[in-house]
Image: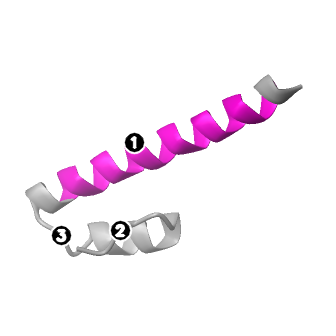
Amino acid sequence: MLLIFDPRIEELMIKHLGFNELRLVDMKRTYREALEKIQVDELFSIY
């Protein structure tokens, strides 16, 4: 299945997915947010 990292694509896909796929989208969103937080934390820990 397509990895959904673009919020614009994500919103379009949600309209066409069933419950299990929506859960997968939610898990990918959580994963993306965690990766972004890690990157920000690493950026500030350098200085």
The quadrant the N terminus occupies is bottom left
Local SS, label 3: loop
**Are circles 2 and 3 on residues that touch, CB within 8 Å?**
no
Q: Please, which residue is most extreme toward the right here?
A: 47
Badge 2: residue crowd in 10 Å (few <14, some 14–19, many ≥20): few
Q: Which residue appears at 47% of the width and 49% of the height?
A: 32
Residue with the mark numbered 1: 30
**Are circles 1 and 2 on residues that touch, CB within 8 Å?**
no
Q: Which residues are magenta?
A: 22-44
Q: Which residue appears at 35% of the width and 68% of the height?
A: 3
Is tag 2's residue or tag 3's residue first in the polypeptide sequence? 2
Residue with the mark numbered 2: 3
Looking at the image, residue 23 lies above or below residue 14: above
- What amino acid does circle 3 point to? Leu
Front-lying residue, 1 or 14: 1
- Residues at marks 1 and 2, CA–CA distance in whole angstroms: 13 Å
Residue with the mark numbered 3: 17
Local SS, label 2: loop
